[in-house]
Amino acid sequence: MKANEILRRIPAVEQLVMHLQRQNRANWLDHENTVKALRTAISEFRQLAQRGDVESTLAQEQVLEWIIRRYWETAELVVEQSLKKVINATGVVLHTNLGRAPLCMRARQQVMTVMEGYSNLEYDLESGGRGERYSHVEKRLIELTGAEAALVVNNNAAAVMLALGGIARGKEVIVSRGELVEIGGAFRIPDVIRQSGAVLVEVGATNKTHIQDYERAINPATAAILKVHTSNFAVVGFTGQPEMAELCQLAHANNLVVINDVGSGTLQPLEVQGTAEPTVQECIAAGFDIVTFSGDKLLGAGQAGLLAGKKCYIEALKKEPLLRALRIDKLSLAALEGTLTEYATGAANEMIPGWSMLHASPPQLKEKALKTMECMRLLGDYGWRVGVVQTSSLAGGGSLPGVELAGYGVEVAPLGASAASVAKRLRSGKTPIVCLVRDNALIFDVRCMLPGDDDVLAERLLQIVAGKLA
Ligand SMILES: *Cc1c(COP(=O)(O)O)cnc(C)c1O
């Protein structure tokens, strides 16, 4: 009886639509979807009322407000994006799960320019006819790497697959047993070789491969020698691989193509604690015919796979039908061009976020951590302990394997809640925050935190602490 009475106070849909129109608030749903969302809100209210879960004394105005509030919640959900900005408080610079390299300003601007409308992506402005999308970065890559030619594809996995398919399909490829790596995300060198249609010939042992091992494996069916950078692990102790130039000489003496998958691939020297990443220039100079590397690791651009090498091979790969399936998208290409420009200006270390994060010194990071802690001082009022701690993090993205970067972070020990539960709540919300949890405390490594992240983090923690004790 009472339920029926309250059901009669539900306004008509048209009345609710008019109410929304009078509200001075942007409604992104069109009429049809507005009506649909209102009907859903009404039916929820109806169910609650029928179960007796609504105060029977609610006036018509209050019923209307309830439905309108519910409507806006639904409308927000419709436009909520799944792919979000996340604050990286893990200290891992090229975190694959968090989107790898953050883009530099010039790359972001170039993406904006290209995405807003039309571009000369495959249009030759001089001739007024068809152009080539690869031309936009080829010249720059040649200048930067010292190679004769260059090509870009979707990612480095695609670059390796294209190189092997184009050069060695149906033929043999020799790889050292110490380099049959798994990069993660199901990228395993033996699988990629199989996929490309080439036949893998393993030589040497896990820890040592000699030049003679390669030499003995060469036969008329051999097309190439592939070297793979051991990106995510370090072999220590009694180890050895031939020098790069030695391997290239052997390949060329036998008319073989020699390919180097350098993984992260850097265009400028990077050495931390005695571990150095090979530069692409070094590999080209050593004699490799094709060098492949990623765009979104140390290079600092978006997802892309780069191939630099001899003109005859790059030209042949450009004719591979497979290339069409692996081609780079215009937004990634724009990000790549913008990023490469910073290498040409000589400002990569300052302008490319990944590089400044990698090179941030412990004193700089300590200062940043102190500043971040300062933002969080109100947490102390709730009994949460906050302090600056030393951290050790990784470069990530298949670079500098085994190298621990000494840094600083803010440690927060919550009171009356487990650190894991607070970390979980930090991952929800408009801008999720990803941090570390250690000994029932949260650690916010400041190395990869961007300007303004500290305020967002502090505000979110305060919301959580205040909400909890309210
Ligand atoms: C990361 C990596 C790849 C895969 O590169 P993506 O750009 O992620 O496809 C391939 N080989 C090596 C050695 C790597 O480190």
Image (tube, helix red, strand yellow):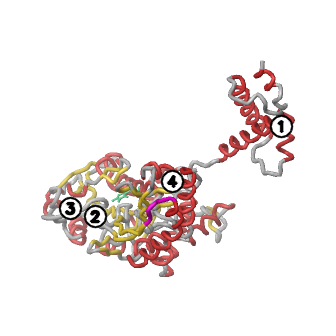
Q: Which residue does the numbered mark 3 point to in the structure image?
A: 235
Query: Start and end of the magenta stretch?
Result: 382-386
Residue 385 in the magenta stretch? The answer is yes
Q: Nearer the viewer, mark 4 or mark 1?
A: 1
Percent coordinates x, y for residue 374 in the rendering: 51, 71
- Which residue is at 18% across, 64% downward? 236
Q: Secondary structure at mark 1?
A: helix
* Mark before the other along the chain sequence, 4 or 2: 2
- Amino acid type, label 3: Val
Q: Residues within 10 Å of mark 1 (few under 14, many from 20)?
A: few
Q: CA distance from mark 4 to mark 2?
A: 29 Å
Q: Which residue does the numbered mark 1 point to in the structure image?
A: 61
Instruction: Work out which residue is located at the far bottom of the displayed protein and give it.
Output: 346
* Mark before the other along the chain sequence, 4 or 1: 1
Q: Which residue does the numbered mark 2 point to in the structure image?
A: 402
Residue 220 visible to the viewer:
yes
**What is the quadrant of residue 285 in the picture?**
bottom left
Q: Secondary structure at mark 3?
A: loop
**In the image: residue 260, left or right of residue 17:** left
**In the image: residue 192, left or right of residue 297:** left
Q: Is 4 situated above or below 283?
A: above
- Which residue is at 40% across, 57% downward? 441
Q: Which residue does the numbered mark 4 point to in the structure image?
A: 426
Q: CA distance from mark 3 to mark 2?
A: 10 Å
Percent coordinates x, y for residue 86 in the rendering: 52, 57
